[in-house]
Image (cartoon, rainbow, N blue to C red):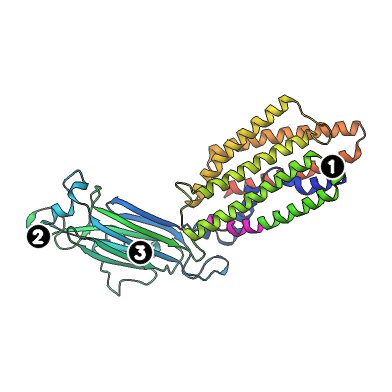
Amino acid sequence: MTLLAALLSRAVGRFSSCSRHQRMLLFIAGLLLCRRNLLVSCSIHEMHEKVTGCKITERMFADGHGPWGTVERSIVHVDATLRPLKDHEVQDTITVRRLSDYFDFGVVLAAYSSDAALTVGFDDRTACSWNFSNSSNMQGELQGKFYLMERDQTLQVNTTFYPKEGGLQTALLVPCWKQKSAAFGYPVSADKFVAYPMVDPLLHVDGEFAFRNPYGYLPGLLYGLFPFNGVLSLMYGALDVYFLVLIYRYRQSVVGTHYFLLIVLLLATGESVAWFVTYKLLNDSGVPVCCPYPDSVLFSTFMKVLAGMVARIATTLVSLGYGIVRMQISWPEVFVVSGLGVCYFIAVGALEVSHLANQSDGDVRPPAVWEALVIMTNACFGGWIFLSLELTRKNLAAFGQTAKLQVYTSLNRILVAYVMTSFFLMAIEGAM
């Protein structure tokens, strides 16, 4: 019983998977420090397709002003190869080759901070006629270049932009055209280039649009979880070692429940390590979190959901008295516990994957439908756990099992404190 009391008082807090609320604590602290910075979102966008043009916007930290004193560079880098679509690649009559007798074509590649562009009136409609002279290119705020495009010509375009201010940063690629002569009578300017208005693809682009913050490519909503999971992994590792020492020390009184608790802790450790490695890979590589989801993200999500499911099942079994008060549970209890576990696995799996996609887009709120289903599943687990705890405590008190009663009283207090903390964090999350 000494071993059981020691293990329960330290390990049962992990029974109801609280990793999401642990992360919420980190979000809250970050929001209090820098609410806008949490919405930064960077990655590498690869493009290998037919397009009319493209506009990609990410929220970034200012150059040399990353979180926690990071002074590395923020970079928007575009490197692309453009060519006009050939006649056989389109179904209609609009290609640079077919219209080259009547129109001149070009393309503008620009990178800019949204606030600076708004101030001077620059956007995708004015880009083609913009004077990108040395004086109008504002270092770190707005820069661009116009490229004249001949038929059958392949263009190599690139730019590197270091945002002077934090906020929305945009990489813009706009095809342009103008009449060779006003005598042709087309409703297109013959004096200056204007944005090509058609929706039909005009160019084939093979390029890479890279947005990198001072710390790497992770979205701001996820970057804080990178070091957090590293520290959490070390803490869980230390707890695992301590748990094993306790099991060895009290090996004469170890029961099957203790090994179940060990599995829960090992799964929690595996989850934290998996997320740490995943965030490290995403931060270094620039692979978007979504979509499609990288294999490492899917594996880490699987580990998280599995750890939460096993933790809830373990809590329920201990509350029913399995391994401590009685040596077996009934088949109906096995069926209900298994069913709730499966429901939890499906609901939380869908919630985590969709929530991760939202976070990569700068949206803090999880999908309401899946969150509601998770809440209902947790409510079923919680209700059953507390009812079982109360019944087990009454039986122990009736039979004078004071040592076991003390253990279950401690467990009840831990779970009550956890539930109250969870509701508090959920209320704060909803308010934001």
Taking the image as shown, residue 338 lies to the left or right of residue 129, namely right
Mark 1: which secondary structure?
helix
Q: Which mark is residue 389?
A: none
Q: Which mark is residue 407?
A: 1
Q: Earlier in the sequence, mark 1 or mark 2?
A: 2
Q: Quadrant of residue 411?
A: top right
Q: Is residue 156 above or below residue 258?
A: below
- CB contact under 8 Å: marks 3 and 1: no
Q: What residue do we see at 33% from left, 59% from top?
A: 172
Q: Can you tell which of label 1 and label 2 is closer to the viewer?
A: 1
Badge 3 amino acid: Ala
Q: Which residue is mark 2?
A: 181
Please state the extent of the stretch shown in magenta in the rendering. Answer: 219-231
Query: Hey, which residue is sitting farthest right in the picture?
Result: 400
Badge 1 amino acid: Val
Q: Is residue 39 above or below residue 130?
A: above
Query: Hey, which residue is sitting farthest left in the picture?
Result: 183
Q: What residue do we see at 27% from left, 72% from top?
A: 133
Mark 2: which secondary structure?
loop
**Residue 70: image x %, image y %?**
54, 69
Q: Earlier in the sequence, mark 3 or mark 2?
A: 3
Q: Can you tell which of label 3 and label 1 is closer to the viewer?
A: 1
Badge 2 amino acid: Ser
- CB contact under 8 Å: marks 3 and 2: no
Q: Which mark is residue 111?
A: 3
**Residue 154: image x %, image y %?**
23, 60
Query: Hey, which residue is sitting farthest bottom in the picture?
Result: 135
Residue 187 visible in the current orientation: no
Q: Earlier in the sequence, mark 3 or mark 1?
A: 3
**Residue 145: image x %, image y %?**
28, 67
